[in-house]
Amino acid sequence: MAALSESASPEAAASPEAVFHDEKHASYLVAVSKNTEAIEFVLTEYMRMSGVYWGLTAMALLGRDVHKEMDGDAVVAWVLRCQHPCGGFGGGEGHDPHLLYTLSALQILALLGALDKCDGAKAAAYVAALQQGDGSFHGDEWGEVDTRFSYCALSSLAILGELWRRSPPLIDVAKAVDFVDRCRNFDGGYGAVPGAESHAGQIFCCVGALAIAKRVDLVDATLLGWWLAERQCDSGGLNGRPEKQADVCYSWWILSSLTILGRSHWIDEAKLAAFILECQEPDGGGVADRPGNMADVFHTFFGIGGLSLLKWFDGTAYAGRPAIDPVFALPAPLVAELGLEASVCPRATASLLETWARARDEEKETPPPSP
């Protein structure tokens, strides 16, 4: 397990040798958005909405003029063409509506100041209609259930201002919370459905959903914090499950969850920052899943997002960029502007070692069961 310290300061993570390829990352993101002839562009058509969200948000976190540099007007027009009469959005033009891409579309419109240009009422009704009797959500009309969709539904309705505004509300928030809570496992983590294996990506979705519903109190923050801290590898990077390789994307999934729980200092933050920086492509820009691999937009966004959560930029020449919100995965100033709220745990003051020691002592004091 990684060394456990009370805190790794931003200054400690920002060593003089650390280089962040700011301009190259921005150039990479712009180039990727315009290279319609690349095989990657063709193969990812079905999920382009999410790709555009990753690229735009990464640019925003770099402090760039997203509207100007990413042709905001054209992006807004494209997103609006992806909205179906039912209110949901597809991953691209001509693709079926889905909750995943509906959230991405709303995030994009929020980033570009164009939320009022879509049919928000229909979008909210589309999301609400996907809730099932047990509180879960289908991703689309074909009926798949996954805790990712619970997060997407709550986040979408919050962005639209429709989560709490109506009486009665559009969805049964209490049932949505109950379903997520039933997906909690013995290790404190969460899976895609009740009984499914704990996975860092699902954990973010469940913790984020509970935070938006203002029920993060249901999370066993100490047990889950322990499981998440165990995901740090010798390289400093984080993995999504035991015995897997470290991957930059978990710098977001895990660190955001730990931040919501007030326990980001339970990992070695300086080593994680160093791992992310090592995954940069120094020549062409962008961030890869691990050192030496090819950069892509997905990992570029999550790598920059991870550095933002670590407050790494604060102690460097790159200070002044907007921070990312750990719940809504949007720039914090935009989250404040939209009036989005979520509950988070206060920062945990006790170290994990102290928690373990306390649990061990309590176990010793508990008499064995009678035969």
Image: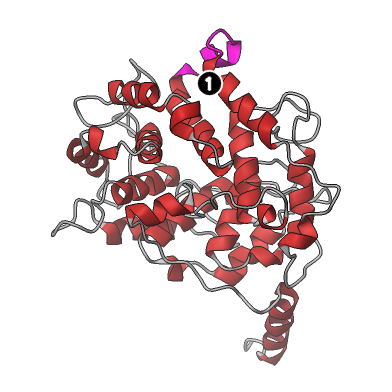
Q: Amino acid at mark 1?
A: Ser
Q: Position of residue 368 (x, y in %)?
A: 67, 87
In the picture, which quadrant includes the C terminus?
A: bottom right
- Judge whether residue 44 is colored magenta: yes
Q: Position of residue 326 (x, y in %)?
A: 52, 55
Tell me how the rendering is colored: secondary structure
Q: Is 280 on the left or on the right of 121, as rendered?
A: right
Within-10-Å neighbours for mark 1: few <14, some 14–19, many 20+: some
Residue at 36%, 53% in the rendered image: 337
Helix, strand or loop for disc 1: helix
Q: Position of residue 323 (x, y in %)?
A: 55, 53
Q: Position of residue 200 (x, y in %)?
A: 59, 49
In this view, 296 is above or below 190: above
Q: Can you identify the residue that label 1 sits on?
A: 33
Q: Nearer the viewer, residue 278 or 236?
A: 278
In this view, 15 is above or below 353: above
Q: Is 344 on the left or on the right of 368, as rendered?
A: left
Q: Nearer the viewer, residue 179 or 69?
A: 69
Q: Quadrant of residue 169?
A: bottom left
> Which region is colored magenta?
35-45
In this view, 57 is above or below 204: above
